[in-house]
């Protein structure tokens, strides 16, 4: 784990080294102060030498100021290094997640990835900050104070032979018990975040079904699970404190007993005993700090493992087989998509390689560039899965998918997806203005191009009524526009890409039939060279397509034009007639 995480801390290595040095120096100066105090008691006060007392007192003040300066330096360095390390770790996780295929994200779950990016990274950040201070300060103080205590009285320092082993046994026992608890704690946090995410994402559904009590109960259960696990973990950690304090005060009492006898017998000076008390307190406090650091590190190890799992996850879809071609200057460049032709050569697909059930089976399909293709089928017939293989959102398990005459693996994902515009079934707009969302399609689009795309998607009808037009703020997730308006904006965004292939996954379901017809007419007139693949539930949305696919059970059961399918395909004919009857009844 250290090898995996160190590169993210390396840019702050200078700060770490300086911070560690400052922490060590701070501890050393703190340890030297009691020696000066001992001289004041045993020499200055014993001899009534006020000049000696003042000189040594001034020296103590200077040493305290120097220690304070080193302490401030350690705090600044640890803060810079810790915050930087946390930022780098979050950035590395986030960047790697962007390379994930859908299957990788589904493996972890969105809620778990959010926790690993936030809570787990924050814990690692705090571990570095605290570790730079305590993991250096505590051992330096412990070793140095032990050494100086032995110098003061070898005989009296024997009390540590009993205290130290007891402390080590207590710490080891607690660490062994809390390790699994901290792992479970992070998993319970994942579960709670999942409930919150689902509730907030589907808040409209929750309210429309009046399921607030059910959601509150579900949240309360996960929240109680997290509370219970936290109480077990931190309750066990808290036990460490009273046990250690018992050992500390027991040691102090033993030093008082034996040290007092030695002072009375004249074998130990009073100032030396006072100094010894200071050191024994520092030794015990150092041990307590070390134990708390180990508790913190135990939780950090659990978080680090979860972060490394994210960083070690190999994306299911990569550019490893991407091909290159020569440009006009003879330089090698990534292969570009030549046209919008799409071919499925005996393609089969399943989400899980170990699953016996195929989602798509033996798909053999050939679409010419510029064609308009409609896809119909019942729920679960794998229509969305089929089109998701074109931009490699999923990878075909068997067979080959080709775009522009090349296998999709021959392109980098950037070049392939730039050539394929896709409006997903679940329309997503991001917080910001309409303009900012549309520019996802083409960051360099002019005002005229933006409005042209909006007209093509029939979005200009409502944009012109908005006071701020393209600069209207959408709010989080596009809450300020209706479902149909959101669909049209997503279509406009895809058109701005000027794609070779445009895929509409039931993306006009929320618009009326008249607007749907206008959009299809614009596509036919203005996107003649673009291959258009339209998944729809309404037959009227695809009846004028050059090719219509009828899917059922992960297979293409029939294909052809509207007229052909009306004669040859019973499923198509039944769907068409039922919808026409519904229109007649509605009329």
Image: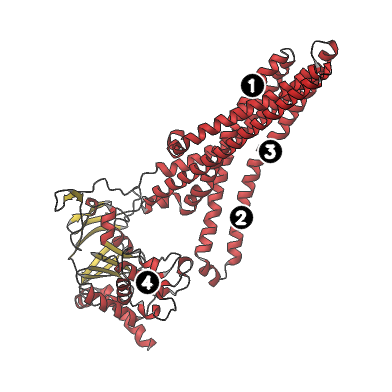
Characterize the local packing of mark 2: few (<14), some (14-19) or many (20 or more) Cα atoms within 10 angstroms. few
User: Which one is closest to the eye, mark 1 or mark 3?
Assistant: 1
Task: Give the number of marks.
Answer: 4
Q: Element at badge 3?
A: helix
Characterize the local packing of mark 3: few (<14), some (14-19) or many (20 or more) Cα atoms within 10 angstroms. some
Let me know if residue 166 appears in the view: no
The reply to whether discs 2 and 4 touch (Cβ–Cβ < 8 Å) is no
Q: Between disc 2 and disc 3, whose residue precedes?
A: 2
Q: CA distance from mark 2 to mark 4?
A: 40 Å
**Residue linked to disc 1:** 144
Q: CA distance from mark 1 to mark 3?
A: 28 Å
Res 583 → quadrant: bottom left
Q: Between disc 1 and disc 3, whose residue precedes?
A: 1
Q: CA distance from mark 4 to mark 3?
A: 55 Å
Q: Element at badge 2?
A: helix
User: Which one is closest to the eye, mark 2 or mark 4?
Assistant: 4
Q: Locate residue 459, reporting x and y percent.
A: 36, 76
Q: CA distance from mark 1 to mark 2?
A: 50 Å
Q: CA distance from mark 4 to mark 1?
A: 69 Å
Residue 222 located left or right of residue 244: left
Characterize the local packing of mark 4: few (<14), some (14-19) or many (20 or more) Cα atoms within 10 angstroms. many
The reply to whether discs 1 and 3 touch (Cβ–Cβ < 8 Å) is no
User: Which one is closest to the eye, mark 4 or mark 1?
Assistant: 1
The image's mark for residue 221 is 2
**Residue linked to disc 3:** 238
The reply to whether discs 2 and 3 touch (Cβ–Cβ < 8 Å) is no
**Residue linked to disc 4:** 489
Q: Is residue 399 above or below residue 55?
A: below
- Quadrant (top left, top right, bottom left, bottom right) of the C terminus: bottom left
The reply to whether discs 1 and 2 touch (Cβ–Cβ < 8 Å) is no
The reply to whether discs 4 and 1 touch (Cβ–Cβ < 8 Å) is no
Q: Between disc 4 and disc 3, whose residue precedes?
A: 3
């Amino acid at each position: 784990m250290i090898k995996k995480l160190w590169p993210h801390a390396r840019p702050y290595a200078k700060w770490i080294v300086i911070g560690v040095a400052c922490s060590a120096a701070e501890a050393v100066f703190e340890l030297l102060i009691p020696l000066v105090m001992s001289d004041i008691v045993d020499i200055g006060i014993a001899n009534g030498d006020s000049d000696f007392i003042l000189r040594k007192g001034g020296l103590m003040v200077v040493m305290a100021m120097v220690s304070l300066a080193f302490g401030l330096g350690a705090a600044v360095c640890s803060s810079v290094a810790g915050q930087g390390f946390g930022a780098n770790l979050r950035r590395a996780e986030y960047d790697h997640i962007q390379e994930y295929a859908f299957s990788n994200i589904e493996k972890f779950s969105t809620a778990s990835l959010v926790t690993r990016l936030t809570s787990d990274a924050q814990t690692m950040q705090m571990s570095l900050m605290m570790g730079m201070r305590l993991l250096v300060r505590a051992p330096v103080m412990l070793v140095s104070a032990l050494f100086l205590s032995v110098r003061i009285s070898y005989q009296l320092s024997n009390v540590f032979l009993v205290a130290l082993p007891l402390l080590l046994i207590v710490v080891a026992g607690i660490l062994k018990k809390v390790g699994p608890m901290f792992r479970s704690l992070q998993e319970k946090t994942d579960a709670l975040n999942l409930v919150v995410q689902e509730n907030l994402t589907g808040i409209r559904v929750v309210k429309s079904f009046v399921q607030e009590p059910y959601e509150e109960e579900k949240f309360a259960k996960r929240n109680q699970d997290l509370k219970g696990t936290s109480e077990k973990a931190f309750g066990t950690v808290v036990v460490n404190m009273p046990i250690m304090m018992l050992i500390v005060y027991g040691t102090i009492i033993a030093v008082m007993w034996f040290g007092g006898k030695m002072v009375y017998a004249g074998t130990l000076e009073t100032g030396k005993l006072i100094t010894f008390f200071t050191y024994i307190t520092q030794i015990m406090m150092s041990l307590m700090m070390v134990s708390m650091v180990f508790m913190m590190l135990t939780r950090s190890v659990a978080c680090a493992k979860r972060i490394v799992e994210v960083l070690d996850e190999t994306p299911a879809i990569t550019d490893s087989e991407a091909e290159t071609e020569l440009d006009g200057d003879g330089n090698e460049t990534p292969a570009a998509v030549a046209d919008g032709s799409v071919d499925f050569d005996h393609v089969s697909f399943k989400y899980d390689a170990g699953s016996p059930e195929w989602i798509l089976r033996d798909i053999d399909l050939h679409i010419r560039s510029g064609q308009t293709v409609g896809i119909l089928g019942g729920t679960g017939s794998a229509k969305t899965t089929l089109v998701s293989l074109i931009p490699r959102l999923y990878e075909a398990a068997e067979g080959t998918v080709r775009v522009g005459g090349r296998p999709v693996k021959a392109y980098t994902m950037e070049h392939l997806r730039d050539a394929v515009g896709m409006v997903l079934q679940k329309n997503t707009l991001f917080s910001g203005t309409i303009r900012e969302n549309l520019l996802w399609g083409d960051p360099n689009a002019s005002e005229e191009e933006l409005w042209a795309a909006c007209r093509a998607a029939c979005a200009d009808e409502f944009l012109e009524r908005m006071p701020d037009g393209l600069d209207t703020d959408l709010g989080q997730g596009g809450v300020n526009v209706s479902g149909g308006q959101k669909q049209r904006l997503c279509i406009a965004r895809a058109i701005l890409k000027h794609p070779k292939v445009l895929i509409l996954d039931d993306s006009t379901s929320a618009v009326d039939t008249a607007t749907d017809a206008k959009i299809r007419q614009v596509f036919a007139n203005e996107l003649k060279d673009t291959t258009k693949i339209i998944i729809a539930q309404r037959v009227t949305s695809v009846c004028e397509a050059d090719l219509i696919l009828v899917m059922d059970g992960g297979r293409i059961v029939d294909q052809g034009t509207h007229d052909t399918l009306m004669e040859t395909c019973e499923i198509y004919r039944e769907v068409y007639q039922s919808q026409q009857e519904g229109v007649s009844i509605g009329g």
